[in-house]
Image (cartoon, rainbow, N blue to C red):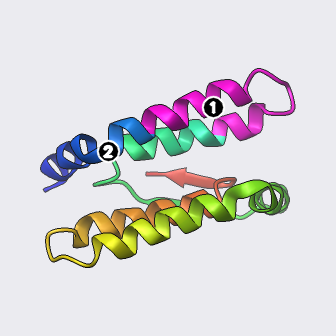
Amino acid sequence: MRFLGNIIWLLLGGLAISLCWALIGIILCFTIVGIPLGAQAFKMAGLTLSPFGHSVAYQGRFGSALANLLWLVLGGWWLALSYFVAGLINLATIVGIPFGIQSFKMAKLALMPFGAVIR
């Protein structure tokens, strides 16, 4: 199911979204201040390429909490909201349920990317 789910995910928009995340990461890495944010965008690009079979775990640290707060204020909540809405739309059909679950996983990562490890 993981392989088939990832292939379908890529064909239905995952590849385009992943390329957008990578482009955002490259743009953010042009400045020294943007490098930590760019690294998180690359993390999102990697998870977007193959969300099935991966999980997100958090290693809570104080610095991560502060960085997540800054990310949240700068627009992370919009990203998380868009993934959440996409997840709700996917849950409207039986076929879309696995994709909705993956969208919720990415919403969580988009909300708090700092300190998150993709396994």
Q: Residue at x 24, y 67 (%)?
A: 98
Across and down, in percent, residue 78 comes to 64, 62
Label 2 belongs to which residue? 13
Amino acid type at mark 2: Gly
Magenta-highlighted stretch: main secondary structure? helix
Q: Which residues are magenta?
A: 18-39
Instruction: Give the structural element (helix, strand or loop) at label 1.
Output: helix
Q: Taking 30 as reference, is 117 left or right?
A: left
Q: Taking 47 as reference, is 36 left or right?
A: right
Callouts 1 and 2 close, C-beta under 8 Å = no
Across and down, in percent, residue 91 comes to 28, 76
Q: Is residue 65 above or below residue 25?
A: below
Q: What is the CA distance from the residue labelled 1 to the residue labelled 2?
A: 18 Å
Q: Does 118 lie within the magenta span? A: no
Furthest residue in direction top, as rendered = 30
Q: Residue at x 34, y 36 (%)?
A: 15
Amino acid type at mark 1: Gly
Instruction: Give the structural element (helix, strand or loop) at label 2.
Output: helix
Q: Residue at x 50, y 35 (%)?
A: 20
Label 1 belongs to which residue? 25
Q: Does 19 lie within the magenta span? A: yes
Res 24 visible: yes
Name which of mark 1 and mark 2 comes first in the sequence: 2
Q: Is residue 27 above or below residue 98?
A: above
Res 59 visible: no
Say which quarter of the image contains residue 16.
Answer: top left
